[in-house]
Amino acid sequence: MVELKTDTSIDALHAAGRIVGRALTAVREAARVGVSLLELDEVAREVLREAGATSPFLGYRPSFAPTPFPAVICASVNDAIVHGIPTGYRLRDGDLLSVDCGAELDGWAGDSAISFTVGRPRPADLRLIETAERALAAGIEAAVAGNRIGDIAHAVGRVCRTAGYGIPQGFGGHGVGRRMHEDPEVPNEGRPGRGLPLRPGMVLAIEPMLIAGGKDGYHEAADGWTLRTNDGSRAAHVEHTVAVTESGPRILTARP
């Protein structure tokens, strides 16, 4: 069931989303060659603590997971697409890092993700990330009342496919509200004019995931969480929580 949020509720979601934006900004600023993923997780934890927020990631255990998630960020490096568990791995020159983070404040959730390079970037990685960001922008632009979920999915997928990138099937965006994951599902590929109609008050996480090699195949790593590309090529993941309003899409997780 899809819950339509009031203007007051959307403002509360925006407050949670701003914390997520600050956390991701802090993590990106701290991410340098030699810094560990666990250290980046601690950076995000401190932002949440200072804001009086909690993490919807920490302890989260969906049906597919063998164990509860142990961190407040997902940190996915190079061929990891999403759900990477922060470890003692220390960032190396040229790494591509995707960071997903959430926050809960006063009973409302925010969810967002960024991808960036560490040290000297590979041109191919910059193209991949730029395409992911364009796909996200296209999805947000389609999140208007009167459109349908399929219009968002088509907008995202068209940017990805036109650039020659793969899309991991079965993973995409979702509703956001009192919980981090709510109805409806928001695929990263679909047919325009199909699916649930978009109405003011719907709040959606739109999150393109791109595989550089052009194939869609992925597999679950031994930790039971991390998804990796089958061909070993790199991946990018970006995300914003967005409200559908009478005046157009409102990004609730904008970063400073």
Image (spheres, rainbow, N blue to C red):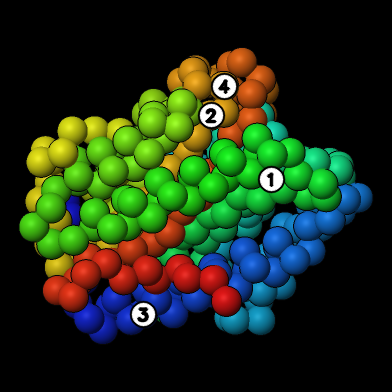
Q: Residues within 10 Å of mark 3 (few under 14, many from 20)?
A: some
- What kind of residue is marked 2? Ile
Q: Residue 142: horizontal and vertical position, in percent?
A: 24, 54
Counting residues from the start of the chain, the first of labels 4 and 3 encountered is 3
The residues tagged by marks 4 and 1 sit, at their Cα atoms, a distance apart of 17 Å
The residues tagged by marks 2 and 1 sit, at their Cα atoms, a distance apart of 13 Å
Query: In the image, is 103 to the left or to the right of 151?
Result: right
- What kind of residue is marked 1? Leu
Camera-near label (3 vs 2) is 2
Residue 66 in sight? no
Kindly identify which residue carries mark 1: 97
Residue 238 in sight? yes
Question: Which of the labelled discs sits on residue 211, or is there none?
Answer: 2
Counting residues from the start of the chain, the first of labels 4 and 1 encountered is 1
The kind of secondary structure element at disc 2 is strand
Counting residues from the start of the chain, the first of labels 3 and 1 encountered is 3
Question: Which of the labelled discs sits on residue 12, or is there none?
Answer: 3
Question: Which of the labelled discs sits on residue 213, or is there none?
Answer: 4
Camera-near label (4 vs 1) is 4
Residue at figure coordinates x 41%, y 35% from the top left: 160
